[in-house]
Image (tube, grey):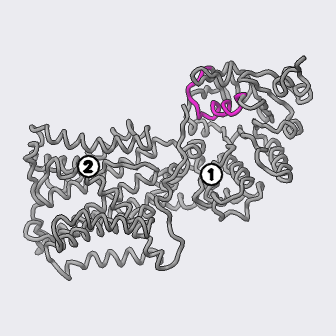
Amino acid sequence: MKKVIPPAVGLVLALCFPLVTTDPFILSLLIEAGVWAIAVMGFVAILRTGEFSLGQAAFMAIGGYASALVTINLGIPFWFGLVFAGIMAALVALALGVVVLRLGGIYFAIVTLVFGEIVRIVALNWQGLTRGATGLTPSAPSTIHIGSITIDFIASKVPFYYLIVLLVLVAAVVFWRVDRSRLGRTFRSIASNETLAEHMGIHLMKYKVIIFVIAGFFTGIAGAFFCHFTLFMGPTTFDVWDSIMILIMGIVGGTSSVVLGPIIGALVLSAGGAYLTSALMVGMKPLVYGIIVIVVVVLLPGGLVDLGRYISRAPRISSLQGVKRHKKRGN
Amino acid sequence: MPILELRKLTKRFGNLIALREFDLDINQGELIGVIGPNGSGKTTLFNLISGYYRRFEGEIVYKGKRISGLRPDQIARQGIARVFQSYMLYEDTSVLENTTRCCYLRCETNSWQSFFNTSRYRKEEVNQRAEAEELLQPVGLAELRDSLAGKLPYGYCRLLGVAMALATNPTLLLLDEPMAGISHDEKGLVINLIKKLRDQGITVMLVEHDVKAVVDICPRLVVLDFGRKIADGRPEEVTTDGKVIEAYLGVEQG
């Protein structure tokens, strides 16, 4: 019971935030942070099996384009577009994962990195579908009327804010629940010692693909949400640097935690970083981000999530715990 | 019918032939030791049986079913469990958790039930934890159940490996050098453990360097030399076999 209190408090705070301020700039920062939080949760979930996916932004792009295309060309409502985006991203994750997760390790990381680039290049050149660099202009969800209540997505950012809070909540519950269940322990077994896990009856590929697909699903939805929020979807909306930022947000937040770490990482680097740099000069952004990363990695290798432990003097986590593993090299 | 049949097993690594046309039949409930000088192919043999190597020549038939080329997890499900020689543990978690995870092989609830935390799943979790605790008793690790596996002394690691293998409820146990790196007093413990396993009806195949210990406990010995089987029989016969002596000590010169 005690463990539910901090997240519940966090949720209440998040829900009440628009009562404090409806400043569109601040809300936009938080909304963007929410989008990245979901993507980072996916990244960390994959990391739990010992694999680095450096291509998560590609799934955001796939989700974004899927939803944009289906809502623009087929007139399908935003809500179905969102689900469709998740499914499309999951299918691509399935196809890619089945082929590439076999490689594992550094090879998998490189291929996912390259995959991100491939998605960008395809989006750029398949003019007929994506309108290339011009991009697509998806629209915001249409206004909803429930009785006397009107939810207008165009007039204010608040409905988007609540929607992303809901999406982050759903993703958080799923990823947290997976991590706590036998599935999660199986993933950790794989990350800890692949050879042993295999000899104890664990089908490595099945589990790696499962989490890769789940992560792809939510990441696709996050991407779709984002493009309907910013009303634009282009080849560079989600690129390689975004994939790397996802990795960095994961590390800064703390990879030992599947939900809180990603949320903290996204808030600090996305919302926090943007807020700081808006107050300073434009070119300071990389500098600010770099300083944050260095400070965290040196002082708190377990990520900011460790700050709570630091304060309570619990034993701290070493960097990338659970990721060092025994890779099989049989033939 | 023998429980395990190995037919003409051959494993090459480029030009190196680690195992040559190895034939062996093992009967249910046997306790068989595989010995041989360094590099004779003992570990390679285990790697083939447990599925660590999947490309080789020859056939492996277990309980009448062809298992050559299957993945290690498929072979584990057939009832073959392996206890490794070096540190093969989930080092970042407790002794009890290590053992519990090996019970998952036999779980009946599926992933959906585990995700939704159904009452049946929770009951199974509790049962498996209890089973795991029981498994730690015969190896003497019950008190260390909350210790971090990565911090265990080597001897205890080996015992934990045995507990974990037994958690999968195997019918064939592959013991990789059980006597390696353990003290003289602990050797007695291990020998008793192996005898108890045999009494439970589990077929045990062990690979070992310490010929003396093996001679005392195994009613049947197989000797490997340069990947080839050179002897197969009772310890008294095998240890006096000229070929075996030659393999270990070399030929007398002059």
Q: Position of residue A265 (x, y in %)?
A: 33, 66
Task: Please name the residue that numbered disc 1 is placed on.
Answer: B89
Q: Amino acid at mark 1?
A: Leu
Is residue B31 found left or right of A77 in the rendered image? right
Please state, as top left, top right, bottom left or bottom right, where the N terminus of chain B lies in the image.
top right
Furthest residue in direction bottom, as rendered: A20
- The image quarter containing residue A173 is bottom left
- Please name the amino acid that badge 2 sits on: Val
Residue contact at pointers 1 and 2, CB within 8 angstroms? no
Which stretch did the figure color magenta? B40-57
Please give the chain letter of the residue carrying mark 2. A
Front residue (pair B243, A95): B243
Q: Which residue is mark 2?
A: A240
Q: Is residue B236 visible?
A: yes
Crowding near pointer 1: few (<14 within 10 Å), some, many (20+)?
many
| Separation of marks 1 and 2 at Cα, in angstroms | 36 Å
**Residue B113 location, x and y as percent?**
47, 55
